[in-house]
Image (cartoon, coloured by chain):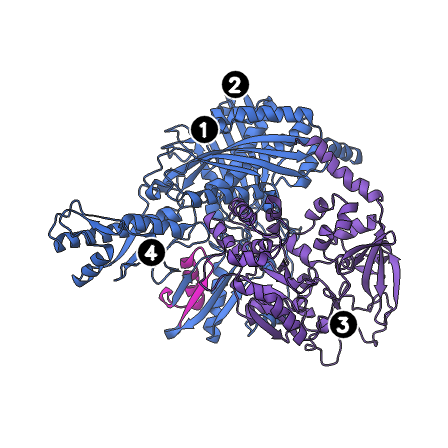
Chain colours: A purple, B blue
Amino acid sequence: MISFYLNDQPIHTAEPAASALLDFVRYHEHLTGTKIGCREGDCGACTVLVGELVEDGQRLAYQSMTSCLTPLGNVHGKHVVTVEGINPAGGQLTPVQQAIVDQNGAQCGFCTVGFVLSLTGHSLSDKPATASSTRAAIDGNICRCTGYKSLERAAARLTAELAGRPATNSIKWLSEKQFVPVYFTEIPARLSALRAATAPAEAPAVAGSNGHDADGAHISTSPNGHAQSQNGQHSASQPVPHPLLSGGTDLLVQRLDELRQQPVRLLFDQSGRRGVRQHEGRVVLGAATTASQLLESEVMRGLLSRLPDYLKLVSSTPIRNMGTVAGNFVNASPIGDLTILFLALGAEITLADAAGASRSLPLAGLYLGYKKLAKAADEQVTEISFPARRPAIFSILRRYPSVRTSTLPA
Amino acid sequence: MALVLARTEAQAHAALKFIKADISPLPIVTDPRQAAAQGELIVPPRTFRIGDSAGAFAGCVHVFEGVAESGGQEHLYIETQGAYAFPTEMGGVKIISSTQGPTAVQRHCAVVLGVGMYQVEVDVTRLGGGFGGKEDQATPWGCLAALGAFLVKKPVKLVLDRMADMRMTGKRHPYSSDFKIGLSKDLKILAYEVTYYQNAGAAADLSPAVLERTLFHTTNAYFMPNVTATANSCRTNLPPNTAFRGFGGPQGMFVIESAITKAAEALGVLPSDIQRRNLLREGDLFPYRQPAELCHAEQAWDTAAELFDLAKQREEIGEFNSKNTIFKKGLAVMPICFGISFTKTFMNQTRALVHIYTDGSVGISTGAVEMGQGVNTKIAQVAARTLGISINRIKIETTNTTRVANTSPSAASATADLNGKATELACLALRERLLRHASTEFAVDYEGIIIENEQVLAAGIPAETTWEKLVSSALVRRVSLTENAHYATPGVHFDASVEQGHPFAYHVYGTALTIATVDCLRGTYTIDSMQIAHDFGQSFSPAIDRGQIEGGVVQGIGWMTLEEVRYNDEGRLLSNSLNSYKIPDLYSVPAVLDVHFLDTPGHPNAILRSKAVGEPPLMYGIGAYFALRDAVRAFQPRVALPLVAPMTPERVLGGLYLEVIMEKQTVAG
C-alpha cells in the first residue's frame, strides 16, 4: 500500500510502485491539469511538486518533479501537489498564475501548468529567490509558443514579489499571499500522522505484488534494473531478485510497461542512502543522492567550484531532483553524465548483496562494456566515495571556465 | 495499416505487439534531387518568371552561383496529435479533434465512413499548439477515432505518444536549391535564377501549396527585374511533409539570403550593402506581378538600423573580434516581406455566427481555431468594439462544423483577418438592427445613435437605456438577435496558368538585427540579441502581437540553428524524441529580444488595420544563421563555408576548422 497526500486529500493505493505518478494523477484521480507532453522528462508539461517532511517534522521541502518519470512508490509518505491543489477555495489566481497571465506568458496553454508548478515550487523553496534562481526553476519546462520572453518577464516579477518572503516559516507568508492555499500549513502535521498510521517508508521497498506471471517468472530487466542474470553468475533456475528502481528517470522512460507489472525494490527513499559527507579524507555519497543534492552540497562545491556550471548542462531542475548518482552509474551508457565526472575523481563504489555482504571496487571496474556491469543481480550500489582532494579533474574543470572568463567581456 | 481498439491504453499497446507486418522492402529514396532525377515529382514543376534573367546575366558585372540547403523542422506542439469520437444518433459521429482544419476532418471522415458530411460533427475547443502541423495532418487521427467509434458504437480516443507522433507525422519541407545571382557594378541585383528541390515525402499533403509559396517569396523583400524561379516537389520515401509556420516562404528566403551572402563574401562587401540597396519600394512588381503597395521595406530597415544603432554595434563587434581569439561575434540584418492570404484564392472566405442572448451576453462562433495565437481574444475585441460593449459579455465558442460550415483551416496567418472581418460584419449588422429598433422605440433619428460603454446614446433616448434594455426590448419587438455574416477577402486573384495575379491581401514588412557569439574552441554559441522593427499596422492587441513575434522568432532561430531532423538511409527517423531533437529551451533564446512597433497605417484588408502576425516573424530567425556564419568567418575567413542549415554547434565547429578538415580529406583522398 502506498500512502501519501495528493493536494489536500490522503491517498492509499495498491497501484504498482513502478507505475508513473502521472498516470495515477490523471487516470485514477482524474486530475487532468497535469499534461502529457513527452513521457520522458524532457518537456516538463507534467511537472508536479513533491514535498517531503524535513527532519524536525515541522515543515516540508518541496521539489519539482516530472510526474511521467516519478515512480508512484517514490511519493510514499510525501505531499504531491498538482495544479488543482494550489488555488484558494475562491478560485483566485495565485501570484504565480497572475504574473503569467499579466505577462501573456501562456499562448496555447499546454505547457503552462508545468511552468506554474515549477515556479510555485520555487516560491516554496527556502533559498532566496534571485533572477537566475527563478529562471533556473523553469529550465526543465519547454514552451513551443512564447519564445520564453513573456515567461521570463513573469519570472522577473515573481522574483521581485518573493523578495518579501521571510527566511523562516515562509509557508505562513506564502499562504497569506495566496501562493498556496491555507491547507499547506497543516500538511506537516497531517503527513506526520499519516506516516505514523501507515508502515514506515521502507514498506513499499518491495511493492506491488500484483502482476506476477502465473509461473512466477519475472521479466528480465537490463541493465540498471539489475535483475537479470549478469555475467552468467546466476543459473536460469535461481529466483531472480526484483528489479531495483531508484529515481526512475531512465527506467520509466525505457521500461515503464514491464516494470509496473512486477514488484520492484525501491531505493530512492532507503534510509541513509542520501547525502554527501566527508569521512577520513574521503567524500562519501549515499547511492540515492540526487543530482540536485550534489549540486547543493557544500562539500562538493568546496572541492569543485564550477560544479554548478557543469551540472547546468546535465538535464534540468526536475530531473536533477529525481535522478540519483548510483542510478546514473548503473545506466552504463554515455547518457549517464555524472559517470564521467566521478571516473575522473577516482571514485570507488560499495556494493551490497542480498545477504548484506558488501565489497568495494573502483567505479571504472564496474563497467564491462556498453550496458554491461560487473555486478551480480542481487547487488546494489550503497555508497560512492572519492579522495577529498583536488585531483586532475579539477584543473580540467577549472580550465574550461577560465578560458571563458578571460575572453568574454565582463 | 492497422488500428487497435481496446478498453485501456495498456491493452492497446500490448495488442500492437501481436501485429506482424510482412513487408517486402523496395528501393528507398530520401534525397529530393535523386527523386527529381528519377522523375518522381508530386506535381509538374512550376516556374515564376519576370523579365529575362538569362539575357540579363550578360549585362551583370558580378555573377555568382551556388547551392543552399535548409533542413526540416519538427512542429513539436506540446500536445501531440489526437482525437476523441463518439457515435451520435441516426448513424452519425461526433469528433472532438485537435485540428487546425475541422472541415478537413469532417470531409475526410465522411468519405471514410461513407456518410454525408452532415452526419459528421467536428468540434475543436483549442489546440495545445499547431504551427501548421495540425492543418492537414490532424485529419487521419480524427478519421481513425471516428472509424473506431462508428464500428464499435462506443467512444474512441486516439492520442499519439510523442515518439509515434514524431515518427508518423510530416514536418517542415527540407529544400535543396541551386541559385545564380547577377549584380551590377553598384550592387543592384539585376538577375536571379533559382531551382528548388522540395523534399515532399511520399504523398502530396500540402506540398504543392508550400511549393507555390516558396515561389511567391523567392525574392523576399527585394526588387529584382529579372527572375526565373523553378520549383520541383520531389517524391521521397519519407512521411509526407506538411505545413509549418511560413509554409515554404522561409525556405525560399533562405536561398536568396544565401545568394546575397555568397556574393557579398566574394566581393568583400557586407551582405547588408547588397540587401539595403535592393529593398522593395512602393509600386515595385513582385515576380508574380502584384505591386508592392503600402510598402514599408525601407522604413523597417532604416528604423531598425537607426533605433538599434547598426553602425555602432558593427563597430563594437569589430573591436571585440580584434581583441578576442577564442570568441568571435557576428552580425546579420534580416529584412522580411511576407504575403498575407491563402494563395489558393477560394480559401479566403469564412463565416461568423453571432448570437446576442436576451441578457445581453454574446456568443460568437467562427471558423477560427484557437491554438495559442490569440485569435479568440482578437475576435472578442473586434465584437466588443463594434457593439460598444464590454469584452466580458462575450464568449468565443468552440469551432464547430455544425455551427460554422465549410471553413478553411486556421492557417496562412489569415485567421484573425478573415474571421475577425466576418465577426465585424455580423456585429455591424446587429448593431444597425438594434439602433434602428432604438430609433423606432424612442422615436428619434437613426443617425447619431451610438452604443458606447454599454450605453445607448442619442438625444431623446432616456439616459438609463443600457445595452441590456436595448436587447430585451428588441426581442419583444421581434428583432433578430442573431446574425450570420460571410466574409471573402476582396481583390485577391491568381492565374496559375500564367503564374500571375494579385494573390495577397497585403504584405507585412520588417527588419531584424541579430548578433551571435561563437566559442571557436568548441563550436558552441549564443544568439546574443535580436532587435526587430516590425510592421504591425495598427495593432489592437500589442501584447498578443508581441508574443507572436517573440515565439515566431525563437521558432525560426530553432529551425536555423539547433533543430536537426535526421533520417537514416532507410528513411527511419533518428531524431525521434525530445532527447534526440533539440528545440530552444529557456537558455537558448537571445538575452535581448527587442520588438519595435513601426509606425505604419496598416491595411484596409487587415482586421481593424492590424496586420497578420503569425508567420512573418519566423523568418527573422534566418538572421541567426547568417550572424553565426559571420562570426565563424571572423575566425576562419579563408575557406568559403557551405550554405547548409541548420547551423548546429557541430556544423559551426566544422566551419571553424574547415581548412583542417579539407586538408585531412586531401591527405586521406
Give the position of the N terminus of chain A as an image quadrant: bottom right
Nearer the observer, B437 or B132: B437
CB under 8 Å between discs 2 and 3 = no
Q: Which residues are magenta?
A: B92-119
The answer to whether tags 3 and 1 share a subunit is: no
What residue did someone put label 3 on?
A242
Q: Kindly identify the residue that appears in the image at 66 percent across and 56 percent down.
A: A319
Residue to which mark 4 is pinned: B394
Mark before the other along the chain sequence, 1 or 4: 1
Q: Amino acid at mark 2?
A: Lys
Check the image and report above or below for B18 versus A291. below
Q: CA distance from mark 2 to mark 1?
A: 27 Å
Q: Amino acid at mark 1?
A: Thr
- Residue B303 is tagged as 1
Which is nearer the N-term, disc 4 or disc 2? Answer: 2
Left or right: residue B526 versus residue A94 is right
The lab-note entry on whether marks 4 and 3 share a chain reads no
- Camera-side residue of B181 and A361: A361
Q: Is residue B357 left or right of residue B406?
A: left
Residue B637, by quadrant, is top right
